[in-house]
């Protein structure tokens, strides 16, 4: 099992900034990727930002230029820095770790979710 503990989130005004962090522990495979997803009320969960297996990053078009994903491999922690926040960024943000075994199907683990609300 893998445990993902998220921190950060909260209420921020439009145009403000917020940071999220997610620390992973447990049975983390040697081949894994981590990222952030979000789910707004009445909408499906969507990818926000994630690392690829080769270490590059992928970001949703809606957050390009505003959000940055980073990580500390020594701490098994991934971060999401969110700048110039908009009301449409309001959602529950989930940390994801995907183990990619050499054999077998990928296995996804999720954090408990943290609320981000952008409102004046």
Image (spheres, grey):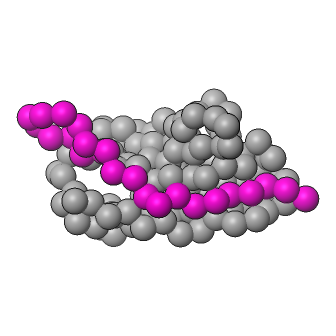
- Rendered view: 98 above or below 74: above
Give yes or no for residue 108 being in the magenta stretch.
yes
> Horizontal and vertical percent for residue 98?
30, 45
Q: Which residue is drawn at 50% across and 52% down?
A: 94
User: Does 41 sit left or right of 78 as displayed?
Assistant: right
The quarter of the picture where the C terminus appears is: bottom right
Q: Residue at x 66, y 54 (%)?
A: 82
User: Does 112 sit left or right of 16 as displayed?
Assistant: left
User: Does 48 sit left or right of 83 as displayed?
Assistant: left
Residue 66 versus residue 87: which sits nearer the camera?
87
Residue 14 versus residue 115: which sits nearer the camera?
115
Give yes or no for residue 42 being in the magenta stretch.
no
How many numbered marks have been drawn onto this rendered protein structure?
0
- Rendered view: 96 above or below 6: above
Is residue 80 shown to the viewer in this render? Answer: yes
Is residue 84 shown to the viewer in this render? Answer: no
> Horizontal and vertical percent for residue 79?
50, 59
**Name of the residue lying farthest toward the right:** 120
Range covered by the magenta-colored residues: 98-120
> Horizontal and vertical percent for residue 95?
46, 54
The quarter of the picture where the N terminus appears is: bottom left
Q: Residue at x 17, y 51 (%)?
A: 30
**Name of the residue lying farthest toward the left:** 103
**Name of the residue lying farthest toward the front:** 42
> Horizontal and vertical percent for residue 43?
64, 35
Which image quadrant is residue 3 in?
bottom left
Q: Which residue is drawn at 59% across and 68% down?
A: 8
């Amino acid at each position: 099992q893998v445990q993902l503990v998220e921190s950060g989130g909260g209420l921020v005004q439009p145009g403000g900034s917020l940071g999220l962090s997610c620390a992973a522990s447990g049975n983390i495979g040697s081949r894994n990727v981590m990222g952030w997803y979000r789910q707004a009320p009445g909408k499906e969960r969507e990818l926000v930002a994630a690392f690829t297996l080769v270490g590059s990053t992928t970001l949703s078009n809606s957050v390009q230029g505003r959000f940055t994903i980073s990580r500390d491999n020594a701490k098994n922690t991934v971060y999401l820095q969110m700048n110039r926040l908009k009301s449409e960024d309001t959602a529950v943000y989930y940390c994801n770790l995907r183990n990619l075994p050499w054999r077998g199907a990928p296995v996804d683990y999720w954090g408990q979710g943290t609320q981000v609300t952008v409102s004046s």
